[in-house]
Amino acid sequence: MYSLYMQLILTIFIILDFTIAKNLTLHNRYDPQNRELLDVKFSGNTMIITGNLNGTEFYDISDSLNPVHLSNLEIPFGNQNRALPNFIAATSDSILYLSARHRGIAIVNISDPSNPQFIGMVPQPNNSNYSYDGLTVRDTVLFASAHEHGVILFNISEPDSPSFIRQINCENAWGTDFIDSLMIIMNGEFGFKILEISDLMNPIELSNTITDGAIKDMKLDGYQLNVALGSHGIVRYDISDPYNPHLLASYNTTGLANRIALIDNKIVVSDWIDVKVLEYTSNQFELVGYKNTGYRTMSINTKGNVIFSAEWRHLQVFEYGPIDAPDLDISSHDISFPEIGVGDKDTIQLILKSNGSEAIEFEYDYFSHPDFTTPSILNTLDPGDSIIVNVVYTKSGNNASGVYNIPSNDNDEPIITCEVLGNYDGVNVGMPAPDFTLPTAANGTNNFNLTQHWSNNGEIVVITFFSPG
């Protein structure tokens, strides 16, 4: 019953998203050398993509729809056989700065992006070991966000030889943005601060705004501030009166609003499972573009109407605009079935939607594993129409993992695939979790006991493990 309930909730969310016309065309998909992609930045016609693993990638985007790979830079650290984790990038002329958590800030010469050269590390104040995330360059100052250590300012009048200026206190600084003499600090779960910094040595805090969720990213559109709040979606504030920021609108995305970029008066959102384009008019957001990417959309940036979507281990290039051809969207690119008995059946629904200007004509759809079938018949789908496909899993004695392939006349995605996962030897969705006790390593003390939180207190416990890859 719980599984069915959650499926119904998911279906309702999906239908809500699919009621709006979408207009994102997929042009290219790349498999970079680096992994766990975290940031997309530009320096002229060079695109820089950072990664937690295997360094930073450089692309020529003179033709923005067709990026050309130039190089990869791996900066070694310590005596470990891996590259310095690169998080957020910022540039000043031909110098690139790369933040790392508890590893400092790297300096790279990118005058020739086909052959970037690692110069060294930014000297840290008092030999500190801060964890850095957001980096912003303004004039001759590098603003480095260091969480509980606030915002660290470095003089980069000599870009390849920064020097420490001062530290601005903050509870959990993740990034900064600027307009006129104002600095906005992205303050994590504490919202955002606005400071007057005409005198950098004597910044004045004007306001401190608490948001419903922890801030993941922010972008200014004039004096209006767009903020990504993770599971709380997107909000927009008027900060023309910096003493009293005014909430204008909110939009509760169905994923995890992680990073945002702008196209004219539109806001592009990396929402974990998809890319969304929102338009702000009359004090409300409207969904005007959408594409389920099938991957973990971590970061995003735009050039004109071209959207670069960094998706954990892949880069996809989309174009925003009307689609004068058949176009097919799918509600999910992967589905997993809960634990059932041998011979039993379970059903999960997928929604296919025709979003182009011409009808979708399906070819023969098929599964790669015999335990999965569908009674649904795909023929033709007129523009604006959708169809529910019932994916049926019948458990046999074999491990069940496969792909549902859906060929069609969609020009940019002639075969859409959905990974389907049934039951297998090991741990499956729906199986009781074994009790365990582990010591608390951060944000608390003592031990964490599953039974205490789950069975005794009725709390929902989500445990996530990440592996390189």
Image (tube, helix red, strand yellow):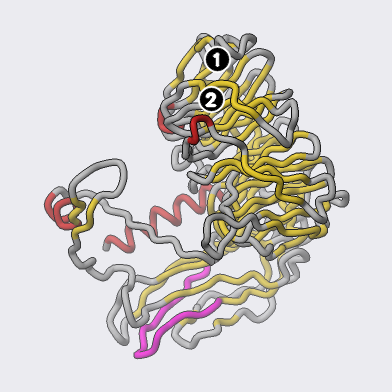
422 lies left or right of 121: left
What residue do we see at 63% from left, 49% from top?
290
**Residue extending furthest toward the right:** 62
What range of the chain is rendered magenta? 389-403
Residue 31 at x, y percent in the picture: 68, 65
Front in this rendered view, residue 468 or 254: 468
Count all numbered tags in the image, as a single digit: 2
Residue 327 at x, y percent in the picture: 72, 60
Residue 247 position (above or below residue 21): above
| Residue identifier under label 2 | 185
Marks 1 and 2 in Cβ contact (< 8 Å): yes
Residue 439 position (above or below residue 395): above
Tell me the number on the disc at residue 195.
1
Residue 71, can we see it? yes
User: Which badge, 1 or 2, comes first in the chain's sequence?
Assistant: 2
Categorize mark 2 by other alpha carbons within 10 Å: few (<14), some (14-19), many (20+).
Answer: many
Categorize mark 1 by other alpha carbons within 10 Å: few (<14), some (14-19), many (20+).
Answer: some
